Amino acid sequence: MKRLFLLLFLVSSAMSGGFAQQPATVQITGSLLDKESLEPLPFATVLVKGSFHGTITSSQGLFTLLVHPTDTVQFSMVGYKTSELIIPAGMTESRYAMLELMEKSTVVLKELKVYPWPSASQFHSAFLGVTLPPTEQDKTNKMQKELEATMRNSYESEKYYDEQLKNRQIYLLTGQIPPNHFLDPVRWLDFIEELKKKNQK
């Protein structure tokens, strides 16, 4: 990965670089940016490789980290390729600034095969054949129907019982079952005569 790496001199030295003493630790202050858009990358991980020493970038993509010469600093973030920076030996100053450009990673997904249905009618049949689990509303409607059926059966039974009770009372009072006029031949003759008179008119 092509990296833009810039070390800016922050602390002036009165001595020549060839005679300066190498510091034990170096403070690196920098910013992580998107390589294409140059937008800051917030909450990225900045870690010294092979250790638990590190930090995360701020909401503006800034960070500060103490490192040793020859340390390898690792930059990582979800959606971006991990990059590394080796702190060179022989650094004469204790504070430096840098910019790190991170490149977006390309995720290769596994191949997914989609098979169509042979015909629209088969798809329609398979779709309608799917049995969905009952919802709470379905359960409520079923209970309501069962309750209505129970009440209706209870009403019919009560009505039949009342009729039987009424007939029984009549039988007890008169000592016989009330006559069934539907089978009375005299009444049938009267009914037929009335029909004839109406037809003659």
Image (tube, rainbow, N blue to C red):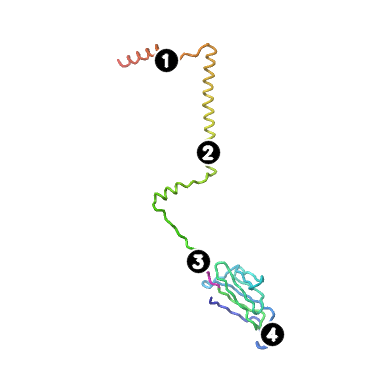
Name the residue type under label 3. Val
Query: Callout 2 environment at 10 Å: few (<14), some (14 to 19), or many (20+)?
Result: few
| Residue nearest the viewer, comparing 175 with 123 | 123
Name the residue type under label 2. Lys
In this rendering, would 187 be left or right of 55? left
Viewer can see residue 18: yes
> Magenta stretch: dominant SS?
loop
Q: Give the vertical position of 26 relative to 108 (above or below).
A: below
Labels 1 & 2 near each other (Cβ < 8 A): no
Name the residue type under label 1. Leu
Q: Give the vertical position of 193 relative to 124 (above or below).
A: above
Does dot 4 land on a helix, a strand or a loop?
A: loop
What percent of the width, then of the height, locates residue 174?
Answer: 52, 11
Residue indicated by mark 1: 183
| Residue for point 57% across, 78% down | 5
Residue indicated by mark 2: 142
In this rendering, would 33 be left or right of 27? left
In this rendering, the label closer to the viewer, 1 or 2: 1
Name the residue type under label 4. Gln
Q: Give the vertical position of 126 relative to 189 (above or below).
A: below
First to last magenta residue range: 102-106
Compute the Cα span from label 4 to label 3.
49 Å
Residue indicated by mark 4: 21
- Please report whichever mark, 1 or 2, sits nearer to the chain's N-terminal start: 2
Compute the Cα span from label 1 to label 2.
46 Å
Compute the Cα span from label 1 to label 3.
92 Å
- Please report whichever mark, 4 or 1, sits nearer to the chain's N-terminal start: 4
| Residue for point 49% across, 14% down | 178
Compute the Cα span from label 2 to label 3.
50 Å
Residue indicated by mark 3: 108
Query: Callout 4 environment at 10 Å: few (<14), some (14 to 19), or many (20+)?
Result: few
- Please report whichever mark, 1 or 3, sits nearer to the chain's N-terminal start: 3
